[in-house]
Image (tube, helix red, strand yellow):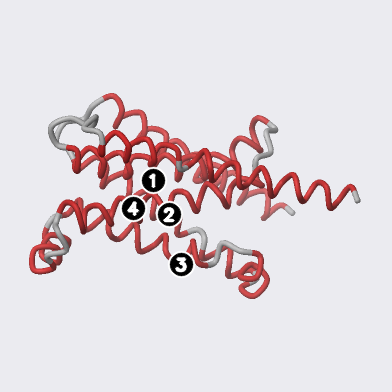
């Protein structure tokens, strides 16, 4: 009974993350519909969705160092945070395709191919697709050790997303600096930890 109750609580908490996670998108949509996003609402909406995609990726990668360094175990929320990052990235790209470019593929395809920041953003989204599809227990069982290898693509995806975010505007502002620093710190932590653990494995 205790196990069932714990699973139910974890499931409820996970759904709570989704509910709270979509609040920024809903609030931004409401502001856009009511004229609260300024002179260029489409661009503002598009940028907000993209920024939250990056934020959820950062939160996803922060789960491990929080557990290892601070003893805060939020592993049960990692899947929800990762999927939120994927859905925000998808919404970000969808706004670009529809509201920004009006589904005019003759301009969209050259845009993706020739503008580096859009190319990088699109590549990051593509990398998130297999991660989202395989973010379930069935995939974990079927893929085995390969699942962990596949999901290391998140490191590449967040790197591309951070550069995409930097190149989207030509001026580095404090918000960009903080987000990119967080990405660099999270990736740097994993790199340093991996280097430290190699000698330990050799000794063992």
> Mark 1 and 4 residues: CB-CB less than 8 Å, in contact?
yes
Seen at 60% across and 42% down, the residue is 16
Q: Which residue is mark 2?
A: 86
Identity of the residue drawn at 66% across and 42% down: 13
For the residue carrying disc 4, how many other residues have a C-alpha within 10 Å: few (<14), some (14-19), or many (20+)?
Answer: some
Of discs 3 and 4, which sits in the foreground? Answer: 4
Answer with left or right where residue 121 lies relative to residue 199. left
Identify the residue position indicated by label 3 in the image: 130
Q: Which residue is mark 1?
A: 53
Q: CA distance from mark 1 to mark 4?
A: 9 Å
Q: Position of residue 102 (x, y in %)?
A: 14, 59
Q: Residue extending furthest front? A: 34
Please name which of the two marks, 1 or 4, marks the residue nearer to the observer: 4
Residue indicated by mark 4:
91
Of pointers 1 and 2, the one earlier in the residue sequence: 1
* Of pointers 4 and 2, the one earlier in the residue sequence: 2
181 on left or right of 13: left
Mark 3 crowdedness (10 Å alpha carbons): few <14, some 14-19, many ≥20: few
């Amino acid at each position: 009974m205790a196990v069932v109750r714990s699973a139910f609580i974890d499931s409820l908490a996970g759904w709570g993350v989704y509910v709270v996670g979509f609040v920024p998108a809903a609030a931004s949509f409401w502001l856009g519909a009511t004229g609260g996003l300024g002179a260029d609402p489409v661009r503002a909406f598009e940028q907000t969705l993209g920024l939250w995609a990056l934020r959820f990726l950062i939160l996803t990668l922060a789960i491990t160092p929080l557990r290892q360094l601070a003893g805060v175990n939020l592993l049960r929320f990692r899947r929800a945070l990762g999927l939120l990052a994927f859905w925000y990235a998808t919404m970000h790209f969808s706004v670009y395709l529809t509201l920004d470019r009006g589904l005019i593929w003759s301009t969209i395809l050259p845009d993706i191919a020739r503008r580096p920041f859009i190319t990088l953003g699109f590549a990051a989204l593509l990398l998130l697709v297999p991660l989202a599809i395989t973010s379930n227990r069935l995939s974990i069982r079927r893929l085995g050790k390969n699942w962990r290898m596949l999901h290391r693509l998140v490191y590449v995806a967040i790197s591309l997303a951070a550069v995409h975010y930097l190149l989207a505007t030509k001026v580095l502002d404090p918000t960009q600096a903080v987000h990119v620093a967080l990405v660099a710190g999270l990736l740097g932590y994993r790199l340093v930890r991996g280097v430290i653990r190699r000698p330990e494995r050799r000794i063992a």
